[in-house]
Image: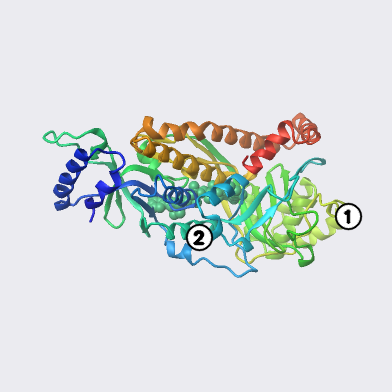
Amino acid sequence: MVFGNAPRALRPYICSSCAKSLKLRSRKFATAASPDIYDVACVGGGPAGLSLLTALRSSKATSHLRLALIESQDLDRVRKWNLPPDQYSNRASSLTPSSQAFLSQIGAWPHIDTSRVQPYHHMRVWDGLSSTARITFDSPTPEPAIAHMIENQNLTRALLARLDSLEPISLLDKTSVREIHLGPPPSPLTPEPTYLNLSSYPHVTLSSNQTIAARLLIGADGPNSAVRTFAGIETRGYDYNRDGVVATLKLPSSFAHHPSSPRGVTAYQRFLPSGPIALLALPGPYASLVWTTTPSQSALLKTLSPEDFTAMVNAAFRLSAVDLNYMFTLPSNQLSEFQWRDSVHPSTASEAKGEIPHLISSVQQGSIASFPLRLRHASSYTTSRIALIGDAAHTIHPLAGQGLNMGLSDSKALAEAIEYAVCHGADIGDEMGCLDRYKGEVWWGNQRLLGAVDKLHWLYSVGSGPVVGVRKWGLRAVDVMGDLGVKGWLMRQAGGL
Ligand SMILES: Cc1cc2nc3c(=O)[nH]c(=O)nc-3n(C[C@H](O)[C@H](O)[C@H](O)COP(=O)(O)OP(=O)(O)OC[C@H]3O[C@@H](n4cnc5c(N)ncnc54)[C@H](O)[C@@H]3O)c2cc1C
């Protein structure tokens, strides 16, 4: 019964006389079409939303809160997600050690299928216009790795499994948001203290016609966040006019990047003028591709035969930018074009030294897809009774593999702010009592990271002129500086430290 639960949810914050008053109101409301009241309602069950709810449920201080998740997709499909060992999802992310630590802390890591997770210990990053301008990152010890490659669905399935193992929350899946509005104005006849005043609570009308009200409404609903629109929070940024082309690739089995290999596993990224191309190892002979390129080149890549697509990926790691651009002008036959060009300038020496990846042998059927890339940052992450996390708050260029990690660090910071408010008897929907703490913890750090990644994108999209020379010199200098200075900073960002 809807309101019958509300006093339990509010117990930590209100005195017994207020609880009595709420109980009386509950009876009054229960007769009309009344909203279901929650402490925290989260719109969006991606990595950010699920990790926040799991963190709240797994902490002693916040485990009693009344929680709801509103998710438009069918969560049973997430629970049942299962691919054979020779197939990998094309949506995979590199998870930093601090994200991994957070997932362990909230009890989700043991639910991850680690046979499908690949740690990597080295990164090779180089300028597409100069093979000598390169930077190398090496993890000094096997543990921690620089990061772990994980399929996004492996992660969300684990978060959901952990959430299912805890005290149940209201999982409103296959349900989307129809409207968000504030509650009815308070009755002048029965004035209430602000924190019991439903007029300040966001009310969410769902596609099921149910209405829920929340002391704190979370927008974890991705880049086109309905919660952010309701809150009137502006975003700053622009479209990159670039697509992120993703695919699952296969290397020859003899070159499988096995974790026990003495060299460890290496991630590769080459900065081409149209954008970076990255090859990130998955277990066995598989790898995940993220190739930033122009919309027209991305459109061509998606029309190619698997053989020609594979040839383009190999060309992008080995041939000059001029050769590659020429191959983009061909409607087909990239394979034979690559074979003769590679035979003229073979890259076997660089391959033997591990400076470039091995030749890709094939692409998994149906795995090629593309996503438009955008930079967006919300001017604030909070307003009264509302907080944004994950892509609802920021979208970042994938070249540093940070988007999902930023969402997890938002969840961690928000869960801690809520925990602090609960322990100190503050209202979790209040900006001063709770939400400012969250915003203060993450906004500026995210702003710095978004700015740095954006500058890297622009620095490397310049194809000629003095910037190219400065860039070559700069990259070598950064590499020589070792783990101090800029290289150390880049390494800490990659590791989320
Ligand atoms: C090509 C590419 C490569 C990337 N690689 C990396 C990487 O290596 N490392 C990394 O850290 N990040 C990476 N990212 C970024 C990462 O994928 C995202 O940052 C992350 O998935 C965002 O998670 P989220 O939970 O905030 O949002 P989402 O995953 O978008 O989840 C939002 C959820 O909200 C639901 N929803 C939306 N609207 C509504 C509504 N109105 N009602 C109900 N439900 C709703 C959706 O169904 C969805 O489940 C990459 C991104 C791209 C495009």
Left or right, 120 with reference to 41: right
Q: Is mark 2 within 8 Å of ligand 1?
A: no
Comparing 304 with 152, the one in front is 152
User: What secondary structure is marked by label 2?
Assistant: helix
Whether 343 is drawn above or below 442: the answer is: below
What residue is pinned by disc 2? 157
Nearer mark to the viewer, of 1 and 2: 2
Q: Residues within 10 Å of mark 1 (few under 14, many from 20)?
A: few
Instruction: Identify the residue shown where x is 85% and y is 53%.
Output: 347
Residue contact at pointers 1 and 2, CB within 8 angstroms: no
Left or right, 2 with reference to 225: left
Q: Amino acid at mark 1?
A: Val
Whether 463 is drawn above or below 348: the answer is: above
Q: Is residue 461 visible?
A: no
- Where residue 314 sits, quadrant-wise, is bottom right
Whether 180 is drawn above or below 109: the answer is: above
Comparing 121 with 351, the one in front is 121
Q: Which mark is drawn over residue 344?
A: 1
Image quadrant where one finds the C terminus: top right
Left or right, 271 with reference to 21: right
Instruction: Identify the residue shown where x is 19% and y is 35%.
Output: 192
Q: Amino acid at mark 2?
A: Arg
Q: Residues within 10 Å of mark 2 (few under 14, many from 20)?
A: many
User: What secondary structure is marked by label 1?
Assistant: helix
The colour scheme used here is rainbow
Whether 42 is drawn above or below 156: the answer is: above
Q: Position of residue 79 (x, y in %)?
A: 47, 64
Q: Is residue 482 visible?
A: yes
Cα distance between the residues tagged 1 and 2: 47 Å
Q: Position of residue 223 (x, y in %)?
A: 47, 45
User: How many badges with numbers are in the image?
Assistant: 2
Instruction: Identify the residue shown where x is 79% and y is 35%.
Output: 472
